[in-house]
Image (tube, rainbow, N blue to C red):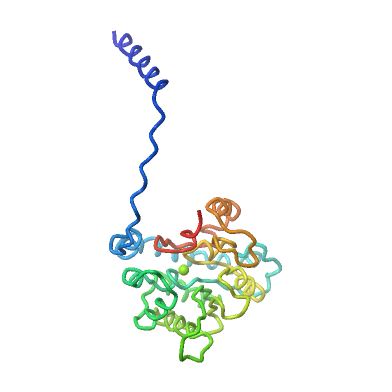
Amino acid sequence: MPRLHVIPVVLLLLVACASAPTPAPLPALAPISHDPQQDLGLLWVKHAAEYKAIATQVYRSAEAALPGYINDTSWSAMPGQTGAENLPPAVILDVDETVVSNVDFQLTFERPFANHKLDEWSSNYESLPITGVKSFVDAARTQGVTVFFVTNRPCEFIEGNNDPCPQKGTTIDDIIEVGIAVEPEYVMLSGERPDWDREKLVRRELIAGTHRVIMLIGDDYGDFVPCARKKVIAPCTAPATRKSRATALQTYDKYWGAGWYILPNPMHGSWTSVR
Ligand SMILES: [Mg+2]
């Protein structure tokens, strides 16, 4: 008896599917809230234990991998770096959302974003560390690894200040405030030299000329992958797209979690620029 009931039901479903109208277009998405206190990305970074757990996981994994990459002198985390066996090992860290947390700035600054607003905030408030970074840097240095900080904070003129890059002092202070001593030569800002644009590849390659780069650590695709942003900056020749970034995931697949360590940042970054 049950079989007699099932067959008509299946037939009815087939008929219904065959004659189903084309689905109506989805309604437009609701406008994105620009209230930072309602922004789930900001709130997640500020309050979620999950965020700190991931940061701990990232830095602990990187720290545990240090001895292997130090001892394997054939290893480089810079695609294309060869002949570096006799160079001293180095790691390259980004700064914002990699070393220092700016979530409190993100929650409070008056939109729209401007670099001088972050610089002023950084000058007036003590920096907070990304969980796990100090332990990692201490471990790297103890094992003889040079730590470079490559940031896209820009050098910008400030009225009444003769320093060509007053933001460098602010950045160094921020790194020191989270417990990491650093000398100016290891902190490299965007625009500090004429060819140091926001495409970080140029600065990474400069470091790779004198050091075997064993790790890259950052929160933005551009901290790892060349040509990750929409704006075309030399040596890139085309704007990044969601598709090109997805392709790069495959191109550089072997590095993620193995020389490249990325922290989450749902608040801002080059990912917001592409379509
Ligand atoms: Mg960053």
Q: Residue at x 64, y 74 (%)?
A: 206
Q: How many marks?
A: 0
Vertical position of residue 181 compared to residue 212: above or below = below
Q: Residue at x 55, y 53 (%)?
A: 249
Instruction: Judge by depth and name the residue closer to the eye, 3 or 32.
Output: 32
Judged left or right of residue 126, residue 221 is right
Instruction: Judge by depth and name the residue closer to the eye, 151 or 236.
Output: 236
Image coordinates of residue 205 in percent, x first then y, are: 64, 71
Instruction: Judge by depth and name the residue closer to the eye, 230 or 44.
Output: 230
Looking at this rendering, what residue extends furthest in the right direction?
83
Q: Quadrant of residue 53?
A: bottom left
On the rendered image, what quadrant is the N terminus found in?
top left
Image coordinates of residue 47 in percent, x first then y, are: 29, 63
Image coordinates of residue 242 in percent, x first then y, are: 52, 52
Judged left or right of residue 128, residue 235 is right
Would residue 49 be seen by someone viewing this image from the given angle? no
Image coordinates of residue 26 in percent, x first then y, are: 38, 40
Q: Quadrant of residue 109?
A: bottom left
Vertical position of residue 6 compared to residue 114: above or below = above
Judged left or right of residue 157, residue 110 is left
Would residue 96 be seen by someone viewing this image from the given angle? yes
